[in-house]
Image: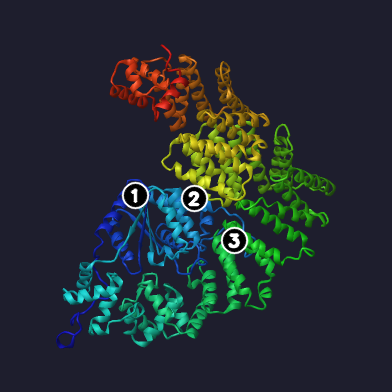
Amino acid sequence: MGDGGRGMLGAVSVRPTSTVLVGRQREMARLRAAAGRARAGEPVTVLVGGEAGVGKTRLLEEFGRSVSDDARLLVGQCLELGEAGLPFAPFAAVLRSVLRRDGPGVLDGYDAEFARLLPELVRPAGTAAPAAGPPSDAPRGYLFELVAQLFGRLAAAQPLILVIEDLHWADRSTRDLIAFLVRAARTGRLLLVCTYRTDELHRGHPLRPFLAELDRARGVERIELSRLERDGTGAVLAGLLGAEPAARAVDDIHDRTQGNPLFIEELAAAGSPIGCAALPETLRDLLLARVDRLPEPAQRVLRIAAAGGNRLAHQLLAEVAGLPEAELDDALRAAVAAQLLVADPDGDYEFRHALVREAVHDELLPGEHARLHARFAAAIEAHPHLVAAGRAPAEIAHHWYAAHDHPRALVTARVAACAAADRYAYAEQTRLLERVLELWEVVPDAADRLGMDHLALLEETLGAATTAGDYQRALTLTRAALAEVDTGEQPLRAARLLDRRGRMLAMLGKSDGATELREAYRLVSGVSDGPDRLRLLADLADHLARIDHADAARIAAEVVTAAQAADTDAALLLVQLAVLKRREGAADLGLAELRRCEALARAAGETPALVSALVHISDVLFELGRYDESAQAATDGVSEARRVGISRSTGAYLLSNRAEALLALGRWTEADQVCAEAARLDPPGVSGLHWLQLRAALRLAQGHPRADETVARALSFLTKPYLHPHNRLPLYLLRLETALAADDRVEALRAAQACLTDPAIVDYPRYSWPVLAAAARAARHVGDEAVAGEVAALAGGVAARFPAEQAYAAEVVACGASGAETLAAWRTAVAAWRTAGQPGELARVLLGYAEVAAGAGKRDEVGAAVSEAAGLADGLGAVRLAERAATLARRVGLRGAGNGRPGADLLTEREREVLRLVAAGHSNSRIAEQLFISPKTASVHVSRIIAKLDVTNRVEAAALAHRLNLLTDR
């Protein structure tokens, strides 16, 4: 035991916490380096992980002090309320801190928008969301942009360090906003630091995939805090004791704590007055040892505080404790002196470590647990101002649920769900509504308490899950709702659910949804006409048009007849019918009718109908080859979608339509920015494929370092059981282009054969022609006449109506041409792409033409074509095309891709002689005999030829020599 019966740590006083930061020099250096990069204008994110008690908060406190002179530090903490907790809690805390220092002017006039995060901000009249109602796809992206802009303004004045603690407790909305800041906003002079517990990340924890996603973003690094080594344990003990501890004490405590700083502090405190035999054996005992030494009144107050959460206001604690003021103050003073609670200037108390609160809370007896949480719920209900503005609904719901008061938990969870929807926190709304569904089963009068039936609750949860992008859960909810609805009594309600289920199945790529849509039509057929019925029929016709145009046209005709009889002229209904007319083959693809719908929607103030019209107008204009107008229509639609809060659904299609038009115009940098904007919205399911496929193709053409990753993400959609041809055919094109870019002849042939066997290849000219042209290029590159013949046969059955389609058709003909017709066919293809007006495609076809011209000995034409293609590629940033132009110029002996004049030949005369013999199929030995040189010298010549022609072997060298006419005398 030691001399005089004293404990092994000796008769020394033990400080409650260590004042020395031990063993973190390397981590501190990395944080300071990250801060330096942020000061230089680089957006930087650091993820600090480690087990509970390892010192994450202490490290950041020390780091904050070290940079406080030249940077602004903002700290927000996630709350332990789970996935259904208070959304955006750490950002709300940060914004409150900003407002206290900078005043409301810092919000730049966007007080109403920031009220979504800080409800205490005064909203203009009429901007508050209703207490209940179906969720809408509100403009979360717009709100996120405002937050990023605010941080940008703060960082412009002074480098900004934003710390988000305890990310393992973060709600999904908080994670979404962090992802936006990291991946999309990328604010300069901002260092974002997030901490999380590694020991909390079980296999199903939502933070695991989130961290993996962040790891792929540029400017993100991880710091993992490990436990201290033995010397570190000794240093912590020395700081706690104020003297060097005995070696045996260090060994024992290090063995027991494994170098966890929090456990070292607690074990040192527990072991100071007693021998080591009495040291606590379990973690809970260890954490509670300091609590057990408090006076009983202080322990009782600490138990009450533990039920309130990690942090709570003095007034709230006083209200729940119900103790005389002096008695409460004495108890709190003891807890603060023991470093179990920490008081802050705002009058709040916070547990020094969440593990201590958890241990105290876990010690509550069942009845005590329920009573305390009920008292907290009642206190907050009576005095909502005792918690931060906006927190009351979530806090009340949490406490009644923890109190096992099922009726109150049911009602308050629904109220909290409505509050979450008002803050654009649809994932949290969904989870709270799921809790309501769970509690419904144990509350007999749930329908009366909520004023709705169970089916209505299912429909509300379905709407929230859909808006949150949780399509898989939404699909499950449609099944549950359909099981409850009485199709005989409520056919329209059942049909709407079937319509949603059919669309959800298609969106998830599980099936085309035709069975559900046709059953919905059967149910609606027996219902008398009315606006709801007509709107649903038009919706069904619109969706069926993608699957069975004849059925859709029949239903559309029925709608037109009924609408005319009822004198109904609903703008959205007209848009849907105009789209059907387009599919019936109108010469202008229904553009005139869509423009009429646009005007009607504007006049009627029907913004959703206007946005829908602009989606289809931009799409039609692109197909007609009017790319500038297409981009402008999409831009107009994006603004309207944002204004009414449908950015993530309909608005996402407008963004990808705009990016597609910009790509066609050759404005690739702008297109990439629009794709990034679509990525920030993160449209769910197949609705997020179009922008992803466009960006993958763009990155492939640019030679982007992450092109392979983006392409793989896009092509993974091909594994889904169902994809509409509009989605599937562009992915075939991407697969072909990827194989051709990698010169993977086997994969190129496999990809060509896969797309040519798809029945849809002849039915959708806009999407079919690019695929057929790529398949023709693959067949020509590989030299597969069978595939080339199949492409030609299929192309004969596909209409070529508009400039781009006609240009692709000309390219197919050129790829399959032979003999004297070949050069003329390629000239025709080049001319067609000049008319179509897509510089990227023109550059590619110019290079194909240049190769053929080289084979025909037209060197002047080769130089001009290569020069033009190289200039276009440089202007676009098309790295792969530029490389092809440079390689071709080198192979045919041009002095440069830009002057178009024949230059010094690429090969020497001796190398040309060797190449002729290689092309004739001779071996190195035979070449040596023919040219009276040694086999080794012949081998050297062959190696040089392969290198100069940028091919991989002598067979490719021979083929290239014939194709580019390199063997003729100059």
Say whether disc 1 or disc 3 marks the residue closer to the N-terminus: 1
Residue at the outermost top position: 970
Whole-percent x, y for residue 149 in the image:
45, 49
The reply to whether the C-beta atoms of the residues labelled 1 and 2 are less than 8 Å apart is no
Where disc 2 sits, the SS reads: helix
What type is the residue that disc 3 sits on?
Answer: Arg
Quadrant where the C terminus is found in the figure: top left
User: Which of the two residues, 917 or 220, is positioned nearer the viewer here?
Assistant: 917
Q: Pointer 1 and pointer 3: residues touching (CB < 8 Å)?
A: no
Q: Which residue is mark 3?
A: 473
Mark 1 or mark 3, which is nearer to you? 3
Q: Which residue is mark 1?
A: 38
Amino acid marked by disc 2: Glu
Q: Is residue 288 above or below residue 912?
A: below
Tell me which corner region of the image, top left, top right, bottom left or bottom right, holds residue 199: bottom left
Q: Using the rendered view, name the quadrant where residue 73 is placed.
A: bottom left
Spatial CA distance of label 1 from label 3 is 40 Å
Q: Position of residue 831 (x, y in %)?
A: 57, 21
Label 1 environment density (alpha carbons within 10 Å; few <14, some 14–19, many ≥20)? many
Of labels 1 and 2, earlier in sequence is 1
Q: Which residue is nearer to you in this view: 750 or 917? A: 917
Quadrant including the N terminus: bottom left
Residue appearing at x 67%, y 32% in the figure: 798
* Residue at the extreme right of the image, as rendered: 565
Q: Nearer the viewer, residue 382 or 179?
A: 179
Residue 264, relative to residue 712: is it above or below?
below
Report the Cα–Cα distance between label 2 and label 3.
28 Å
Q: Residues within 10 Å of mark 3 (few under 14, many from 20)?
A: some
Q: Amino acid at mark 1?
A: Ala
Residue 920: image location, x then y, percent? 42, 20
CA separation in Å, label 1 and label 2: 20 Å
Residue that carries the numbered disc 2 in the rendered image = 145
